[in-house]
């Protein structure tokens, strides 16, 4: 069957199935199970209303449970077992973890991930704040925002191609076609550099790609927050003779601190899962490995589910503080 | 706002210029890829894309017509023609007849030829050779010229990538595969999530707060954890790798954000409308379909854009759940990564392929930016 046709059928079946399920299950509840008539009408209506929320929620709960909650438990289990050649698996306790901790590649990935975790959110947030502040005060601010925001729509793979061209290297006797090398030679460099193969530096060149993408996100959120800063606080500062820089750092930034934390944590989450950029640009060579790509290596190249699951659990462990913090805040807000 | 005290200063110029610098810095890399996709492979390999905006100066070795084309006018022998042949090759500024002196003459000047006679070269490449005696030799006179050629762009790359082109370069199939993945994976989670969001926003039942907290928690669970357990699960129920699997995976992974966004929006809808409808005897199902769903359009649009961009740009989920060994179901992101490996130096192919895959999200982005921004503002956990 042609995939497009299959796609259309899936849409029809999926959408029709959803609507049908919701419609008929409600009908069944109201007309057959607990009809709103007869001697027990009051009790029936109450019972129907107790069950109805679960009808609405059932598909979502099943999907969430199966596709997100169950995998967390199953990955934990897999990380403590080892696949046997003939199928089936064997309990090995923490052996996968200790094997992983013994691998230099893992520590390289951890070190790089820590660098990513510090640098990418910091620079994205800082640039985003700068962009928000700059574009809020000019006439063509909306256009400027759109253009800085644009990389958000570009896939990580597309961004990888875009930046690979920037970092491209040609032999010394030819014209450089990568901007970075052209600038490097223009400002007095002697030999064109293969930027992505210089250990440690290359990680930073990869981080630039993510900063370039995430700055737009930070800008949009922070710009909205900056507009929400009460004007009388700024007026008061101006009357007291504050300079624009003082107004920005002492009046505005403290008032949007909450939003800055949100932006920071959101970008941190993106960083922890970053895979495509490294996969497409260096594939972890030249000491650029990160956890997500390390995990992919173990799962699908080395075919070692135990080790792969163990490294996935490390990612989960790093995410957990943010998870707890988010849930705590959401609950506080609902109260 | 900062000029309230009437201190309009030179600061506003600094702001304007820094904003401009920042914008240029941010679009510069993308512009490079876009421009490159309209250049031929030779052009990309020999000069930086930023140079292609301006006329380029090239040193050319051209040849006048051979001696046998000469005509006799009066008592002089003449060879006439254009050094560039039929196509226009640009504008000659300086030229010469010897490889040691390639810039001896300016356009329009006349040079003495070593073997007798003269040659005049115009800036458009027209030349006229005159000699009192007959020209001899089999081959035409060589002319070394420095020509300025205008910027030149081509659609050839797009033709190769989309229409013709060999099997590994052609993106048409991957384009349709991506589309096939994206559309159901965008529509289905919206529907499932909308009902759940309504229940979480407007229905009273025990455990509601716990469920909302769970959704917030699942929002940040890395999907890396789901890869192996779900692949195992898909193999066990017999769907293996394929579209059905990838649709289901994207639905599952998109649900927390969908529920979260939609619930936050629905909670903000006016209570009166819903309670009036209840008093008038509307069932929850009717309230949802007739009132909540139409009113929630902005939130639905926000999530639809997110999910569309995410599924269109995704590489990992497609690699794990969709693309099998035959490669028949490859998506664009995956094909580009493969091209990066096999065609690493062929920037005309890479740039065009990447831009084909970027183009659709960019159109969606610029057309629906309002909803995207609104979704972002609502979606970042406060």
Image (cartoon, coloured by chain):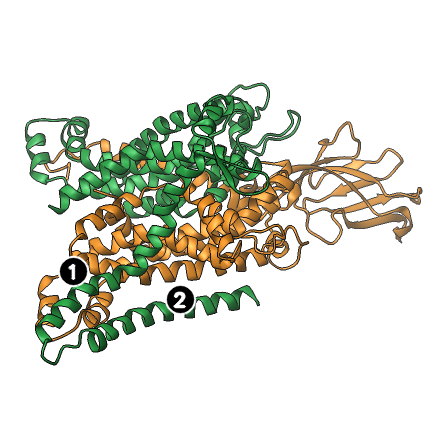
B280 or B89: which is nearer to us? Answer: B280
Quarter that holds the C terminus of chain B:
top left
Residue at the spot 15% in from the left edge and 36% down from the top edge: B2
Can see residue B20?
Answer: no
A104 or B258: which is nearer to us? Answer: A104
Q: Secondary structure at mark 1?
A: helix
Q: Secondary structure at mark 2?
A: helix
Q: Which residue is mark 2?
A: A14
Vertical relation: B95 (above or below) B374? above
Quarter that holds the N terminus of chain B:
top left
Q: Which residue is mark 1?
A: B202
Residue at the spot 88% in from the left edge and 52% down from the top edge: B69
The chain carrying label 2 is: A
Position of residue A302 measured from the top left corner of the image (x, y, whole percent):
57, 35
User: Which colour denotes chain B?
Assistant: orange
B59 or A38: which is nearer to us? Answer: A38
Residue at the spot 79% in from the left edge and 34% down from the top edge: B97
């Amino acid at each position: 069957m042609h995939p497009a046709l299959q796609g259309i059928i899936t849409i029809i079946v999926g959408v029709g199935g959803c609507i049908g399920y919701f419609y008929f299950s409600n009908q069944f509840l109201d007309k057959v199970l607990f009809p709103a008539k007869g001697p027990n009408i009051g009790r029936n209506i109450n019972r129907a209303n107790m069950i109805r929320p679960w009808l609405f929620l059932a598909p979502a709960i099943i999907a969430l449970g199966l596709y997100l909650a169950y995998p967390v438990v199953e990955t934990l289990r897999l990380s403590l077992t080892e696949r046997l050649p003939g199928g089936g698996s064997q309990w090995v306790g923490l052996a996968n973890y200790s094997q992983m901790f013994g691998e230099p590649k893992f520590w390289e990935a951890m070190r790089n991930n820590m660098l990513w975790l510090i640098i990418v959110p910091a620079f994205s947030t800082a640039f985003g704040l700068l962009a928000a502040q700059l574009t809020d005060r000019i006439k063509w601010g909306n256009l400027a925002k759109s253009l800085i925001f644009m990389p958000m729509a570009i896939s990580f793979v597309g961004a990888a191609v875009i930046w690979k061209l920037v970092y491209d290297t040609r032999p010394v006797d030819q014209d450089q076609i990568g901007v970075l090398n052209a600038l490097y030679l223009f400002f007095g460099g002697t030999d064109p550099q293969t930027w992505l193969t210089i250990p440690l530096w290359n990680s930073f060149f990869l981080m630039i790609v993510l900063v370039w993408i995430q700055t737009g996100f930070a800008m949009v959120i922070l710009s909205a927050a900056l507009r929400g800063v009460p004007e009388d606080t700024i007026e008061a500062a101006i009357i007291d003779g504050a300079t624009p820089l003082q107004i920005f750092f002492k009046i505005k930034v403290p008032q949007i601190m909450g939003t800055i934390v949100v932006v920071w944590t959101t970008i941190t989450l993106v960083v922890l899962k970053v895979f495509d950029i490294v996969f497409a640009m260096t594939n972890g060579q030249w000491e650029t490995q990160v956890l997500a790509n390390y995990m992919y290596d173990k799962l699908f190249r080395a075919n070692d589910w135990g080790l792969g699951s163990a490294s996935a659990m490390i990612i989960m462990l790093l995410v957990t503080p943010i998870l707890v913090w988010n849930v705590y805040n959401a609950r506080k807000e609902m109260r | 706002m900062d000029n309230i005290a009437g201190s309009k200063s030179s600061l506003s110029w600094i702001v304007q210029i820094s904003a401009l610098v920042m914008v240029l810095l941010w679009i510069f890399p993308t512009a490079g890829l876009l421009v490159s996709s309209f250049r031929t492979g030779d052009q990309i390999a020999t000069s930086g894309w930023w140079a292609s905006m301006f006329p380029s100066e090239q040193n050319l070795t051209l040849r006048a017509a051979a001696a046998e084309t000469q005509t006799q006018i009066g008592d002089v022998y003449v060879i006439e023609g254009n050094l560039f042949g039929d196509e226009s090759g640009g504008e000659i500024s300086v030229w010469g007849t010897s490889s040691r002196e390639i810039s001896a003459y300016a356009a329009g000047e006349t040079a003495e030829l070593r073997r007798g006679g003269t040659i005049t070269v115009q800036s458009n490449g027209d030349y006229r050779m005159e000699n009192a005696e007959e020209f001899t030799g089999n081959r035409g006179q060589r002319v070394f010229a420095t020509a300025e050629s205008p910027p030149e762009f081509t659609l050839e790359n797009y033709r190769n990538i989309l229409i013709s082109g060999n099997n590994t370069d052609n993106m048409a199939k991957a384009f349709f595969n991506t589309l096939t993945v994206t559309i159901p994976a965008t529509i289905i989670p919206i529907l499932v999530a909308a009902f759940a969001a309504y229940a979480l926003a407007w229905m009273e039942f025990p455990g509601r707060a716990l469920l909302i907290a769970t959704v917030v928690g699942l929002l940040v669970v890395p999907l890396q954890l789901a890869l192996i357990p779900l692949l195992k699960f898909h193999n066990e129920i017999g769907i293996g790798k394929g579209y059905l699997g990838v649709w289901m995976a994207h639905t599952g992974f998109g649900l927390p954000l969908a529920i979260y966004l939609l619930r936050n929006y629905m909670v903000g809808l006016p209570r009166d409308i819903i309670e009036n409808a209840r008093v008038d005897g509307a069932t929850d199902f009717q309230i949802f379909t007739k009132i909540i769903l139409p009113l929630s359009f902005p939130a639905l649009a926000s999530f639809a854009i997110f999910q569309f961009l995410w599924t269109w740009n995704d590489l990992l989920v497609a690699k794990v759940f969709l693309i099998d060994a035959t490669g028949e179901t490859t998506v664009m992101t995956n094909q580009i990564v493969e091209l990066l490996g096999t065609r690493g130096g062929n920037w005309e192919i890479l740039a065009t392929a990447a831009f084909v895959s970027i183009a659709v999200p960019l159109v969606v982005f610029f057309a629906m930016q309002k909803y995207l921004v609104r979704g972002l503002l609502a979606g970042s956990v406060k």
